[in-house]
C-alpha cells in the first residue's frame, strides 16, 4: 500500500489526489469548535509554519508551561537568562536568545550587525543608523507581520 501511494504521488494528478485526500483526513481529525465559537473559517495549514496562518500550534506541554508562566510575575532578565541557557544546551550553540517571533529575531540580529558592541550606536537606532544602513534580506521575510 505504501509503495503504491509513493508511485501514485510521483505524478501530478496522483499528487493532487493524494493531497486532497490528506487534507480531507486532516479536516476529519480536527475539532473546529474554537473556530465556530469566534465565527472564524476552519483552516487546514498545508504550508508549514506561516505567520499569517498563526505560525504553529503549540503542544500541550508548551500551552501548560505558558499558562503557568503567565500566572506569575517574573523578572524578565532572569527569565531571559534561563531561556538563553536552555537554548544553548538544546542546540549546542555558544549563546541563545529568546525573541517574540522570527522577525523580531531578524530585527535584533540586523541591529547588532549595524551597531556592533557600541552602546551609543545602539541608543541612536532607529533615527541614526550610521554607516551600516543597508541590508540584504530574503524576499520571503519581507512580510507585514512581526517586528
Image: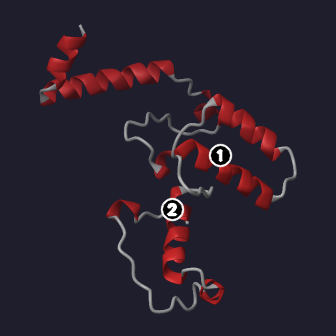
The reply, left or right, for residue 62 in relation to residue 128 is: right
Q: Earlier in the sequence, mark 1 or mark 2?
A: 1
In 3D space, how far apart are the residues under numbered discs 1 and 2 (Cα atoms)? Answer: 21 Å
Instruction: Tell me which corner region of the image, top left, top right, bottom left or bottom right, holds residue 13.
Output: top left
Instruction: Give the residue drawn at x 69%, y 36%.
Output: 63
Q: How many C-alpha atoms fall within 10 Å of the one at disc 1: few (<14), some, or many (≥20)? A: some
Figure check: 80 above or below 3: below
Figure check: 139 above or below 16: below
Residue at the limit of the structure toward the top, as seen here: 1
Q: Residue 1: x, y in percent?
A: 23, 7
Instruction: Give the residue drawn at x 80%, y 46%.
Output: 70
- Of helix, strand and loop, which one carries label 1? helix
- Residue under circle 1? 86
- Residue under circle 2? 103
Tally the marks: 2
- Of helix, strand and loop, which one carries label 2? helix
The reply, left or right, for residue 102 in relation to residue 24 is: right
Residue at the limit of the structure toward the left, as seen here: 11
Amino acid at each position: 500500500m505504501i509503495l503504491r501511494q509513493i508511485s501514485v504521488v510521483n505524478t501530478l494528478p496522483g499528487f493532487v489526489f493524494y493531497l486532497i485526500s490528506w487534507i480531507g483526513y486532516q479536516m476529519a481529525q480536527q475539532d473546529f469548535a474554537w473556530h465556530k465559537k469566534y465565527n472564524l473559517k476552519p483552516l487546514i495549514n498545508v504550508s508549514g509554519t506561516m505567520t499569517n496562518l498563526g505560525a504553529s500550534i503549540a503542544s500541550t506541554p508548551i500551552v501548560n508551561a505558558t499558562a503557568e508562566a503567565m500566572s506569575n510575575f517574573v523578572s524578565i532578565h532572569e527569565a531571559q537568562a534561563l531561556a538563553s541557557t536552555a537554548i544553548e544546551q538544546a542546540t549546542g550553540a555558544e549563546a541563545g536568545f529568546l525573541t517574540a517571533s522570527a522577525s523580531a529575531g531578524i530585527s535584533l540580529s540586523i541591529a547588532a550587525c549595524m551597531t556592533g558592541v557600541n552602546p551609543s550606536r545602539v541608543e541612536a537606532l532607529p533615527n541614526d543608523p550610521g554607516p551600516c544602513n543597508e541590508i540584504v534580506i530574503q524576499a520571503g521575510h519581507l512580510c507585514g507581520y512581526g517586528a
